[in-house]
Image (spheres, rainbow, N blue to C red):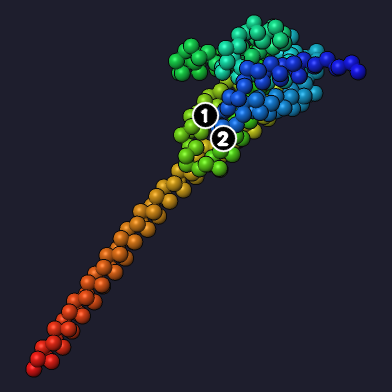
């Protein structure tokens, strides 16, 4: 029986798995699973967006196919975490997809502040397909952050707070949302998710503060009770000694 040829998406997924390996996200999930989730979300956004926009109205630089967007989503972290180069992606996919992946990748040769500024400036000018992938990534990462906060509580706050700050800045660079209603809806949904993450962080901190206060009060109460019990035991002992002395003197007389 003749074996069916791999589709471009299947071929890209195999390539992604080879380069991601067993790497994990900042929240401990498999990076491959995260990128697959981003690809599904990007596909959903793209399908809804292209249904609403007339083909003759769509500018030439935003006519990326849904397949290209899915492949870019699968590879959106590959330049950040591996030694994979632009040419390697272009060989497996297309130059267009490789360019889209490059648009949504940070340049880790730069210091963090400059890196974010350069990335967001480039992202704001990128085709709508690239911005769809970034919105999908923000939504999936925000959901993972919420799940981690609910599971780990205050211990997850420091890394989640840092991720929240980065995602919030990235979302402001999605300028295509002003042109496409569907994308604007998903940007709004992402903003709500980030607000939920922020509120959950506040709740975790308040709970940790309350738990600390309760623990301190409980400790003080235990110490006070122990001191009272010790004093009562000492007083009981003194009474026994006085009673014994009084009885002894009574017997002598």
Asked if residue 53 is positioned above or below residue 146 in the image, the reply reads: above
Can see residue 129? Answer: no
Q: Position of residue 253 (x, y in %)?
A: 8, 94
Rendered location of residue 216, percent (x, y): 35, 53
Query: 10 Å neighbourhood of mark 2: few (<14), some, or many (≥20)?
Result: many
Q: Residue at x 76, y 26 (%)?
A: 48
* Residue in the image at 46% along x and 48% along y: 207
In three-dimensional space, the C-alpha distance between marks 1 and 2, rounded to whole angstroms, equals 8 Å
- For the point 64% across and 28% down, which residue is it? 34
Disc nearer the start of the sequence (1/2): 2
Count of all numbered marks drawn on residues in the image: 2
Residue 171 image point, x, y percent: 58, 25
Which residue is denoted by mark 2 in the rendering?
A: 145
Q: Which residue is mark 1?
A: 163
Q: Is residue 86 above or below residue 224?
A: above
- Placement of 136 over or under 93, stated as above or below: below
Q: Residue furthest bottom?
A: 253
Q: Residue furthest left?
A: 253
Q: Residue at x 35, y 57 (%)?
A: 219
For the residues labelled 1 and 2, say whether their Cβ atoms are less than 8 Å apart: yes
Q: Quadrant of residue 124?
A: top right
Horizontal and vertical percent for residue 28?
56, 32
Q: Is 181 displayed left or right of 244 in the figure?
A: right
Write down the quadrant of residue 223 in the picture. Answer: bottom left
User: Which of the 4 image quarters holds residue 85?
Assistant: top right
* Image quadrant occupied by the N terminus: top right
Horizontally, residue 203 falls left or right of residue 126, namely left
């Amino acid at each position: 029986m003749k074996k069916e040829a791999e589709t471009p998406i299947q071929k890209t997924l195999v390539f992604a798995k080879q380069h991601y390996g067993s790497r994990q996200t900042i929240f401990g999930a498999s990076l491959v699973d995260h990128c697959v989730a981003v690809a599904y979300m990007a596909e959903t956004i793209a399908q809804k967006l292209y249904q609403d926009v007339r083909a003759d109205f769509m500018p030439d630089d935003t006519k990326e196919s849904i397949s290209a967007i899915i492949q870019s989503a699968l590879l959106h972290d590959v330049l950040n975490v591996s030694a994979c180069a632009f040419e390697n992606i272009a060989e497996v996919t297309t130059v267009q997809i490789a360019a889209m992946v490059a648009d949504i990748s940070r340049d880790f040769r730069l210091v963090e502040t400059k890196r974010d500024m350069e990335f967001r400036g480039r992202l704001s000018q990128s085709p709508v397909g690239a911005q769809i992938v970034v919105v999908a990534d923000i939504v999936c990462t925000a959901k993972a952050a919420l799940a981690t906060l609910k599971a780990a509580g205050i211990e997850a706050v420091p890394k989640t707070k840092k991720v929240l700050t980065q995602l919030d800045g990235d979302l402001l660079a999605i300028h295509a949302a002003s042109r496409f209603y569907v994308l604007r809806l998903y940007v709004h949904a992402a903003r709500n998710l980030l607000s939920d993450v922020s509120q959950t962080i506040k709740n975790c901190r308040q709970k940790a503060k309350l738990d600390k206060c309760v623990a301190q009060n409980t400790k003080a109460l235990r110490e006070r009770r122990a001191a009272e019990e010790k004093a009562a035991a000492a007083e009981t002992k003194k009474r026994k000694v006085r009673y014994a002395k009084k009885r002894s003197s009574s017997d002598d007389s």
